[in-house]
Image (cartoon, grey):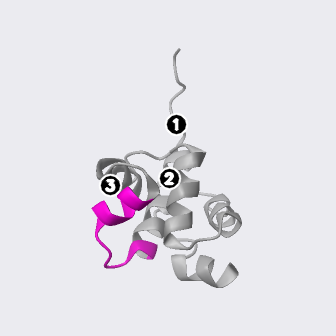
């Protein structure tokens, strides 16, 4: 199966998702959060750095649960990214307040 290349917008949304998760993790150790979510620390690292811009829904759902983030608010924040600018659209604190 051949996967179509990601668009610049899809890559930017992945970077935004990673920023939100990294911010929500705060000072908590990456291996601790990853283990609690049932993913590897390397998977979490790739998501947070934008190197895995389209992670599986189950992965994001597990991470959101561990980090106390609303999936609805997380999805809305990522969907609000409309151009690949590199500028953040929202923060994890905004998502926590929306929960």
Mark 2 or mark 3: name the one nearer the start of the chain: 2
Q: Quadrant of residue 75?
A: bottom right
Mark 1 or mark 3: name the one nearer the start of the chain: 1
Q: Considering only vertical position in the picture, is 66 above or below 6?
A: below
Circle 2/circle 1 CB separation < 8 Å: yes
Residue 95 spot, x, y in % from top left: 61, 76
Q: Which is closer to the viewer, label 1 or label 3?
A: 3
Q: Which residues are magenta?
A: 24-36
Q: What number is the disc on residue 45?
A: 3
**Camera-side residue: 77 or 44?**
44
For the residues labelled 2 and 3, the Cα–Cα distance comes to: 13 Å
Q: Main secondary structure of the magenta part?
A: helix
Q: Which is closer to the viewer, label 2 or label 3?
A: 3
Circle 2/circle 3 CB separation < 8 Å: no
Q: Tell me what residue is drawn at x 28 percent, y 70 percent.
A: 29
Q: What number is the disc on residue 6?
A: 1
Judging by the rendered image, the residue that carries numbered circle 2 is 14
For the residues labelled 2 and 1, the Cα–Cα distance comes to: 10 Å
**Camera-side residue: 36 or 63?**
36
Residue 85 appears in view: no
Q: As drawn, is 4 to the left or to the right of 27?
A: right
Circle 1/circle 3 CB separation < 8 Å: no
């Amino acid at each position: 199966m051949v996967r179509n290349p990601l668009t610049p917008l899809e890559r930017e949304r992945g970077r935004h998702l990673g920023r939100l998760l990294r911010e929500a993790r705060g000072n908590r150790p990456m291996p601790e959060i990853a283990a609690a979510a049932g993913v590897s620390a390397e998977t979490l690292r790739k998501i947070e750095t934008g190197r895995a811009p389209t992670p599986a829904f189950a992965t994001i759902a597990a991470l959101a649960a561990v980090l106390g983030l609303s999936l609805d608010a997380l999805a809305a924040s990522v969907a609000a990214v409309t151009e690949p600018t590199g500028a953040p659209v929202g923060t994890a604190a905004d998502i926590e307040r929306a929960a």
